[in-house]
Amino acid sequence: QLQASGGGLVQPGGSLSLSCATSGSILRFNTMSWYRQAPGKQRELVAIIFSTERTNYADYVKGRFTISRDDAKNTVYLRMDSLKFEDTAVYYCNGVTWTGSNYWGQGTLVTVSS
């Protein structure tokens, strides 16, 4: 249902963009989100975008990350700037439909290293 891509290796201070493509129309999702899970840590919410395009961010990424959506392409993006070592994690996209069904993408690894 959800296909995440765009992870990779980046130096501190660098940028990376993630994509999450939905199979079928993205409009069936009330919310689309990005989560991340670092080694040995719990999965945590990074950013969320509602069908109204309202967005919310975790405090630790505010001002650095931007979530957006392109309904014509059925895709959600996460632009990550000023990356830090602590941003290293597997990033997952998530979608919750209007009926409450919850879908996860397969995860894409982001490694911030010099």
Image (spheres, helix red, strand yellow):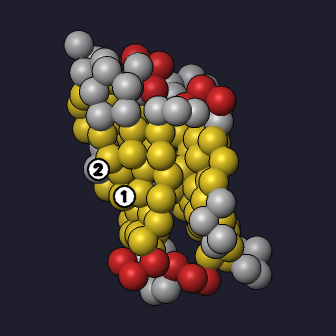
Which of the two residues, 22 or 55, is positioned nearer the viewer here?
A: 55
Q: Which amino acid does label 2 sit on?
A: Gly
For mark 2, what is the residue?
A: 6
Q: Residue drawn 63% across and 54% down?
A: 55
Q: Which amino acid does label 1 sit on?
A: Ser
Q: Residue furthest top?
A: 114
- Quadrant for residue 45, please give it: top right
- Quadrant for residue 82, please give it: top left
For mark 1, what is the residue?
A: 19
Circle 1 residues within 10 Å: few <14, some 14–19, many ≥20: many
Q: Where is residue 108 in the image (x, y as percent from the top left)?
A: 37, 47
Mark 1 falls on what kind of element?
Answer: strand
When the figure is inspected, residue 44 is found, relative to residue 25, above or below; the finding is above
Q: Residue drawn 50% across and 25% down?
A: 39
Q: Residue drawn 65% across and 30% down?
A: 59
When the figure is inspected, residue 24 is found, relative to residue 91, above or below; the finding is below
Residue 43 visible in the picture = no
**In the rendered structure, are the residues bearing label 1 and label 2 in contact, judged by CB atoms less than 8 Å apart?**
yes
Circle 2 residues within 10 Å: few <14, some 14–19, many ≥20: some
CA separation, marks 1 and 2? Answer: 6 Å
Q: In this view, does 73 lie to the left or right of 10?
A: right
Q: Residue drawn 61% across and 59% down?
A: 49
Q: Position of residue 92 (x, y in %)?
A: 49, 50
